[in-house]
Amino acid sequence: MMAVAGWAAYLQWRRSTLPSSSAFLRTLVGTSPLGIIAIESGWVVTEVGRQPWIIQGVMKTADAVTPMAGLFFPLIIFTMIYVFLAVIVTVLLLRQFRASPRFTRVHAA
Amino acid sequence: MLSLEVFIAGSIVVALNLYMLMGGADYGGGVWDLLASGSRARQQRDLIAHAIGPVWEANHVWLILAITVLFTAFPVAFSTITTFLHLPLLLMLIGIVFRGSAFAFRSYDQPNDRAHARWSLVFSTSSLLTPILLGITLGSIASGRLIRTPANFLEAYVAPWLAPFPIAVGFFALAVFAFLAAVYLTLEASEQELREDFRRRSLWSGMLVGLMALVVYVLTGSGAPELRQRMIENDWSWPLQITTAIAATLAYFALWRRRFHLARLAAIAQSSFILWGWAMAQFPNLIMPDVSIHDAAAPLSTLRLLAAALAAGALILLPSFAYLLRIFKADATHA
């Protein structure tokens, strides 16, 4: 991501306009998931890497869990809520794209 | 006197107070969305969406602040509360998530009535249920029914909150939030008839607040005896109750006479006194009957750091909040 931003800055400096070459724009499209990947990778490193400790050297995750029985149900409920929200957000974003006038213009061209 | 842990416990109540005045009114707005009726139902709903829209995400800051300060400064109390009240807190969390998402999805889904109605239903029912669960949680803490050595699952995770007193406190909270929302909305309304609609609603919900206060008080006899004892014994308890009653009467009078700015001030005062009345009755316990602020407090160094963080945070947060409210709320009240 930093490389792409650096490339854009270089192009701007050279041509003093915002870069709009086809190669650059395609690269931009390719970099869009990189942010999410970076965030999720960071979280995975932190949360998986710390196991089996929740407090390094002091307490294990298994000891820190709430003693309530049947935690399986809240886990399933939360997972389903996340899935539901993800699906809805995707559907709504797709609808927004399809309804936008530029979409129809680009696809007609 | 005012030791550091008492000061921090007080800041939790301040955060809850601000949550009630701002976020609570958002929930109340959702309730009135559900109960919108008459020929102006659509306009009522639009007004509510317009009033909540810019500020609802920011309002949840206060709940986050209260919970964070609780687990930083009073970890033992936090673990007891969140372990045994896992179920109502879980449901409350689900309610908060669905309320926020439904509100946002409503704006971004297709602009047809069916989609709008579907999200509105999710939004308003979760706005109805969440205050009840919040009240149930606070009621369970105040009732002294959290059993630290329970015999089985039901006794540990269900009995503390599925009882008349906590449930009554839940409905009491709902009434207070709905009342606050209706009073605020009289000032948000731009047309005379809409203002009258919400004036009527605030009068009805104001009566419900009084009724629920009585029900809750009566139920402390059987459901929260230690709390009742404290309320009777404490010196400042009766002055506080009387002040609350004065504020309530003033609010009612102001609403009746259509002095809406005064009504809003009085309603804010009344609901704040109700909350502080509960907090002062519980003092010095965080959890009735025997977990005191002093016992549950974190080490002094933690408390000092936390107090410094609270002071620095307040310096940033309070002016920003005032600015936010001034931008989005100033235009409505020039009525």
Image (cartoon, coloured by chain):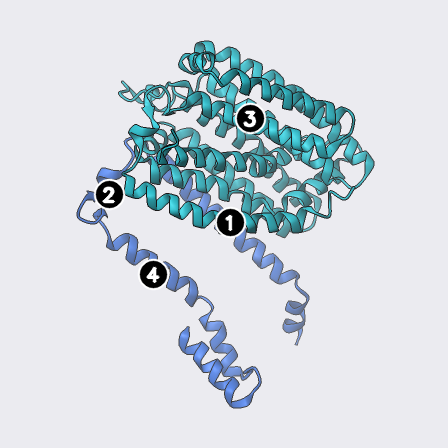
Residue type marked 4:
Ser
Q: Residue at x 70, y 44 (%)?
A: B113
Residue A36 visible? The answer is yes
Residue where numbered disc 2 is placed:
A61
Mark nearest the camera among 2 and 3 is 3
How many residues crowd mark 4 within 10 Å: few (<14), some (14–19), many (20+)? few
Q: Circle 1 — which element?
A: helix
Q: Quadrant of residue B262?
A: top right
The answer to whether the residues at label 4 and label 1 have Cβ atoms under 8 Å apart is no
How many residues crowd mark 3 within 10 Å: few (<14), some (14–19), many (20+)? many
**Badge 2: chain ID:** A
| Residue at mark 2 to residue at mark 3: CA–CA distance | 42 Å
* Residue B89 image label: none
Residue type marked 1:
Leu
Residue farthest toward the left in the current orientation of the protein: A57
**Chain A drawn colour:** blue
| Residue at mark 4 to residue at mark 1: CA–CA distance | 31 Å
Give the camera-side residue of B138 and A36: B138
Q: Residue at x 53, y 15 (%)?
A: B238
In the rendered view, does A68 fall on the left or right side of B121?
left
Residue A99 sits above or below residue A5 on the image: above
| Residue at mark 1 to residue at mark 3: CA–CA distance | 23 Å
In the rendered view, does A109 fall on the left or right side of B142?
right
**Chain B drawn colour:** cyan
Residue where numbered disc 3 is placed:
B273
Residue where numbered disc 4 is placed:
A41
Residue where numbered disc 1 is placed:
B317
Residue A69 visible? The answer is no
Q: Circle 2 — which element?
A: helix
Mark nearest the camera among 4 and 1 is 1
**Badge 3: chain ID:** B
